[in-house]
Amino acid sequence: MPERNRRSTPDTSSSISAAKGKDTPEPKNGVMSSTVKGEQHTPTLAELRHTAAHVLAYAVQDLFPEAKPTIGPAIENGFYYDFDRAEPFTPHDLERLETRMKEIIAADYPMLGMKVSRERAVDCFKDNPYKVEIASEIPPDEPITLYTIGEFTDLCRGGHATSTADIGAVKLMNVAGAYWRGDEHRPMLQRIYGTAWPTQAELDAYLVFLEEAAKRDHRKLGQELDLFSVEEEAGGGLVFWHPKGAVLREIVESFIREGLRERGYQPVNTPHIFAEKIFEISGHLENFAEGMYGPLEVEQLRFRLKPMNCPGHILIYKSHAHSYRELPIRYSEFGTVYRFERSGTLHGLNRVRGFTQDDAHLFCTPEQLQGEFEQTLDEALRLMRAFAFSDFEYFLSTREPHLRVETDSVAEDAIRAALEKFDLPYAVDEGGGAFYGPKLDVNLHDAIGRKWQLGTVQVDFMLPQRFDLKYRGADGADHRPVMIHRALAGSLERFFGVLIEHFAGNFPAWLAPIQVVIAPVSEHQIEYARQVEQTLRKQGFRVEVDESNEKLGYKIRHWKTQKVPYILVVGKNETAAGTVNVNERGSAESRPPLSVADFAKELRERIEEKR
Ligand SMILES: [Zn+2]
Ligand SMILES: [Zn+2]
């Protein structure tokens, strides 16, 4: 029997099987095992985790026979399985299930597959309307397969470990509600999440990682450090920046502006709503309608909240004629856009409905593309290094073959040449480009190794055509400019979510909303503390005095939880000598008192070095 093809992403228990799977060899006699006898099959992580989903469904069948299994795919870091059951699964139920799963794993059941007719599959699951629905929807040219471990058979398209014993370690994580097929008009199911690994050591390491990630959760830190909030009564996915968060944002925006100014960008500002017809011309209504909010009507004119800044910048370009001598023209804006996201998908700062991009649109000639890419890469590197990210990945995405036009290779060559000039290794994602042109994506890894996609630079031949953009060439004739869309931090909201988690809230001094807190030992030193505060403020530092009646120990503990880089303690001796006692974040070292001038010098150096 042929070994079934391994897929990098084995499917759910058959629900999406219609989409792919033509590569699966037909079994000759209808019975299959996951591997050829005697052949060692090392499952991929996804296969292992999807197998664990089967094991979970087996355990549920044994302990809660009334629950109806639906689908159970592998996901990033684990798997889930959705069940229809009236009574909620409790934490105690999960413990029992986990114990049963471990027995099933230890029993070393081989994963046995069998090809069946549609009638047989429907009959087999006649008490389970979900499986019947799945079986009925598998296209006639696709094989229908059942997979069995021990006493449990599931409808599934395959992509498994050879045996349950391949699962080295498993843990059930939590239960959440999920609609059948993500449709809020269909039944609400219970989704049990779990994780599975080849070894216990890998599971343990993953749990440590999760703990660390939870400590860094930007939603939790955002509240503790009073940076931002999402006010549910104002609607989900809309971010309110509190004073400290706004200070942080202002610092980052100034840093980005500085880089743009040096590189010849011109700031512009465009409205948040415009007439709907602009989005008709741009193609957004045609291609992006689901991400847009409905129209607002005023004086018989329909308006839309902008989902992207491009049309606004194009209108500025179009407002007068341009000569080739002016190109490249680079318009930049911290542009706030609004996009519809389902309420169930909203997540802190990562997934929101209104966000601000460090957006810019460049209008240039095809010959200028490479230079613009080099400049953009240079700026992207400056930005990411400033925020202490050091591990980047670059992806050049080309357009799908049927969309390719002649100019695509000009753009791709320009991107390649720029990457090679900076000696940056990159991967090519064939066909992964935007529908209007090739693009370059930059991914980065944060302090605990998580990968984030932030910046993107896209070449666009389409919008200049749709808006009939021109410049007068050296030959006296009109030519079409090429557009580059680029956002390097991407969504500032998301970028701040990443920053908060990357630094675990311990912002380096140049970013910290409060850089220094002065803590007088008693009320007698408040006056001196205020003088020090004034001296430092005059030099541009962000300083506060803790004038509360709390004991010194309490004050220090409090400001430590606020992750302030420096706490300056001033008592009788410091007041007399005109010094401060420096308590530095993350350092237990006791230092001799410093003069205010020396402390200011130290802080200035740290800020300049972006530490
Ligand atoms: Zn399966
Ligand atoms: Zn754009």
Image: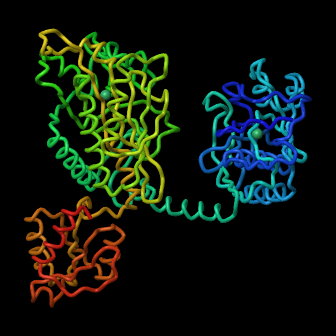
Where is residue 81 drawn, in percent x and y?
A: 71, 43
Residue 232 sits in quarter = top left
Left or right: 375, with 404 as reference point: left
Q: Quadrant location of ligand 2?
A: top left
Residue 408 sits in quarter = top left
* Numbered circles on residues, count: 0
Q: Which residue is drawn at 66% across and 29% down?
A: 186
Q: Residue at x 49, y 16 (%)?
A: 402
User: Which residue is at the front of the view, 145 or 460?
Assistant: 460
Q: Residue at x 13, y 11 (%)?
A: 475
Where is residue 117 drawn, in percent x and y?
A: 87, 23
> Quadrant where the N terminus lies?
top right
Where is residue 7 drawn, in percent x and y?
A: 68, 37
> Quadrant where the C terminus lies?
bottom left
Q: Is residue 80 above or below residue 316?
A: below
Q: In this view, does 463 lie above or below 429?
A: above
User: Which residue is at the front of the view, 208 or 217?
Assistant: 208
> What color scheme is it?
rainbow
Where is residue 568 drawn, in percent x and y?
A: 21, 77
